[in-house]
Amino acid sequence: MPRFEPFQALRYGSNVELVDVCSPPYDVLSDADRLALANRHEHNIVHIDMPIALSGNAYEHAASVLSQWISDGVMVRDDCPSFTLYRMKFTDPTGKPRNVVGVIGALEVVDEGAGGVLPHERTTPKAKTDRLELTRATDANLSPVWGLSLAHGLSVLLSEPGELLGSVTDDLGVIHSVERVTDDSRIAAISSSISSHPVVIADGHHRYAISRTYRNETRERLRSKTSGAELTMTYVNELIDEQLSVAAIHRLYEGISYSELAAALSPFFTITDADPVGSATLSQMNERGSLCLVSRSGRAHWLTPIPEKFAGVRNLDSAYLEHALSHVQHEVRYQHGVAEVQHELQTSNATAAILIRPVSVAEIQRTAYEGLLMPPKSTFFTPKLRTGFVLRELKTR
């Protein structure tokens, strides 16, 4: 099972307003979003996590900025190793109030296929150069991987408050709060709980892969397996329904017309007329047990799976579509949010979209326990963690 350890965290100083300097994760930010955050404050984390250099190497620029912030006291190291409790208070898409808690620590980087730290879905090809170059330059973990623990009772261990360091309310009304834990006995209990069970990667598969590459490079360079690169900063919470809010990642199609797509799906789904997509569409999909096919013009059809056509196929909308379209030439892109999908239909080359239903927590648990993999982009865990609350120096130099 993987080690999960406290570390000497690097944090913004107490004189810095966290609301000005924290940001959403880099992979959900547009160039315009990044610019707005950079203009909000000279010490916003995007200056390091999404660096732009007017001249020279952007990654070396990020490393220089981080070093300067530490020298100037903008960022300060904890006196001793700690865990960071990370709480999110929000209302989920069903209207249910939620209070979730996880812990940020350092999770062991294990070899692919070695067990202990498990993927939960197949990943799509993605350039890893950017994050790897940034890690090499800064020698730091700037944002956490998100892991789901199979440790029963972890949420209870995390329920007691730690030392409150600050909170931020994001644009969606989510309250993000962080608390420091330094008590030795509590650290030992949390570490033991997580280290005794597998951790499933929920978000950050590519960042974890980068950590493995950097670990291997560091081992070769230092001829040692004891550096900070042996672990990577990870947020871990319990894999139970009360601690997870899972949204769907919808599909956008190119290279195939709406009518061709409908024809390809017709042997596998009962296709019936649907009202134009609106605020009730997602709940209607759950009630009907259907997916929803949407055209550029806004025309919509229900796609109700024909059970016998999916014998032996996992009970996932993403798996149904992968199976039905396996021999059909097409290109697919992924987008969360119904409004965002509708915008893409109007402004991109997409010819059609299919709205799918969220994966249940029970199915995610089954995936973990049975060592299975879902199709790419099956799950979208929300809310997204903020970057900037805590950084981890790797100290491999």
Image: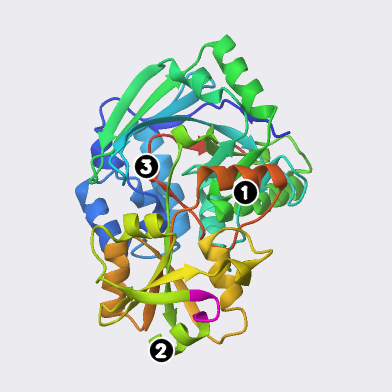
Depth check: give the residue in front, 258 or 16.
258
Is residue 301 shown above or below 9?
below
- Which of discs 2 and 1 lies nearer the camera? The answer is 2
**Residue 116: where, in percent of width, then height?**
71, 39
Number of numbered discs on residues:
3
Alpha carbons under labels 1 and 3: distance apart: 20 Å
Q: Are marks 2 and 3 in contact (CB under 8 Å)?
A: no
Q: Is-magenta flag for residue 267?
A: yes
Left/right placement of residue 370 relative to residue 286 reads right
Which residue sits at x=54%, y=50%? Answer: 135
Q: Which mark is residue 305?
A: none
The residue segment tinted magenta is 265-269
Residue bearing the label numbered 2? 259
SS label for mark 1: helix
Left/right placement of residue 69 relative to residue 150 reads left
Q: As shown in the figure, which amino acid type bears the numbered disc 3?
A: Arg
SS label for mark 2: helix
Alpha carbons under labels 2 and 1: distance apart: 44 Å
